[in-house]
Amino acid sequence: MLTAPIHLIRLARVGFVLAREGAFGLVDEAAIPAGLRLGVRFARLVERRGGDPGAGLAQAMTRLGPSYVKFGQFLATRPDIVGVRVASGLEALQDRMAPFPRAQAITMVEAALDKSVSTTFSEFGEPVAAASIAQVHKARLAEQGPGRLVAVKVLRPGIEPRFKRDLADMRFGARLIERVAPAMRRLRLAAVVETLARSVAIEMDLRLEAAALSEFAENTKDDPDFRVPSVDWEHTAKEVLTLEWIDGLPLSQIAEIEAAGHDRVALARIVIQSFLRQALGSGFFHADMHQGNLFVDARGRLVAVDFGIMGRLGEKERRFLAEILYGFITRDYRRVAEVHFEAGYVPHTHAIGDFAQALRAIGEPIQQRRADQISMAKLLSLLFEVTALFDMETRTELVMLQKTMVVVEGVGRMLDPKLDMWTTADPVVREWITRHLGPAGRLEQAVGALQGFVSAAGKLPDLVTRAER
């Protein structure tokens, strides 16, 4: 078949771009199988000298196109697969691409909505933001009166076949590596590519992003300091998402925020606490909370946009997060250790006392630092390093949480360089602990368990009848 040579040719180009940008400088030759070391050494012969390998890796992914930008962003959340150095290099990867013409966007919108743009919108502007999968236009609906301002997100023309082709190359490459280097099979590269493929498939259906936004809005509706744009379902389809236009200042515009009279210190607190409420409350959190996706409106509320990347924590993960943060705040390392064992994250072949001692080695140095030097994201990163020594498997959802926390803390400290993470997080964490692990929370859990038992008991006669048949 011709498919294998085609895949190899395209992957050879990928390898050349990576080599040319110096990305192989991040590879630890001692950590890869002997059969691949010669290839890495050969690749380094063509690299540009004097560049930073981390920046080079991000540049290479950008040159390779939208699929590889997404792949790079995904791998940035998996240091267990690519290593800490590579993951750190990919953290700088920005999902920004050149916009496609307005005329193409209009064609896409009309095909998706089966309506003329000129009759649907009284205004349809040039793109205001462009990323790997879609771009956004400012528009005004053709309604009675002035018409509402909306943001219209439009999929890139031809993006699905492009991703399909590149993902086929990645699948081929993953299988090839696992075949020629059996030691690499533990990384489960083929499974990683399939996870990426599922994630991209979701991002390419903008109705699913609209649904995520709708769920997120429901979860955060009681937060007086935080809001999200509303969805215009009438003008939303697989390839088009129409949202309320947000008139606000991006958090990156510090001077403008101050000139408008907004309180930077209060905004920093809102950024951190709103994120923790998302993660601990419903467990459904915005996983792309960089400064370009966060605005402050005229009333001083934080407004989030772009819901293509979301994270989700189950009840067990939320309890785990709350208890470890609370344990470190109160210096109860024994309890932090017990939580890991109760969740089944650390095998019982290890001793709780030994694990608690290792956790103390993380926590005590942090307690000695100034408030503005404490980082919850760094704490989680160190925690993952220690738990690896105790055979804790990587939890993808917790790694995504930690990576998001890095970005959120960065935004918070940009607004308030003296931000005290412990003091800011403490009321949210304590509220969750009191609500869920206090007497009221335990009563609620007992009632839930009883309801589950009653429901199961009610189904027994039907199950018995079916079994007798």
Image: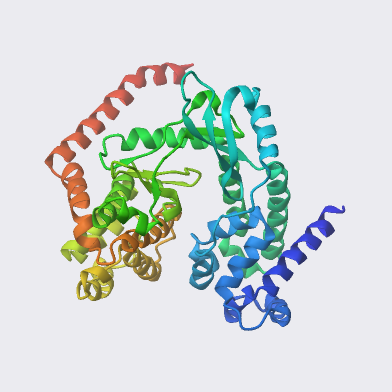
Nearer-the-camera pick, 373 or 399 = 373
Q: How many labels does the image show?
A: 0
Nearer-the-camera pick, 360 or 125 = 125
Look at the picture and state if 58 lies above or below 53.
above
Instruction: Identify the colour scheme used.
Output: rainbow
Task: Give the image quarter of residue 354.
Answer: bottom left
Q: Where is residue 156 in the image (x, y as percent from the top left)?
A: 66, 43
Task: Give the image quarter of residue 374.
Answer: bottom left
Look at the picture and state if 23 lies above or below 330.
below
Residue appearing at x 42%, y 16% in the figure: 465
Q: Is residue 265 left or right of residue 148?
A: left
Nearer-the-camera pick, 341 or 406 = 406
Q: In this view, does 24 lie to the left or right of 142?
A: right
Q: Is residue 388 left or right of residue 336?
A: right
Res 191 seen here: yes
Which residue occupies the extreme right position in the image? 1
Nearer-the-camera pick, 439 or 157 = 157
Q: Position of residue 400 (x, y in %)?
A: 43, 55
Q: Where is residue 78 in the image (x, y as percent from the top left)?
A: 50, 61
Q: Position of residue 206 (x, y in %)?
A: 56, 36
Residue appearing at x 52%, y 23% in the figure: 234
Q: Is residue 445 left or right of residue 56?
A: left
Which residue occupies the extreme left position in the image? 439
Res 180 seen here: no
Task: Give the image quarter of residue 32.
Answer: bottom right
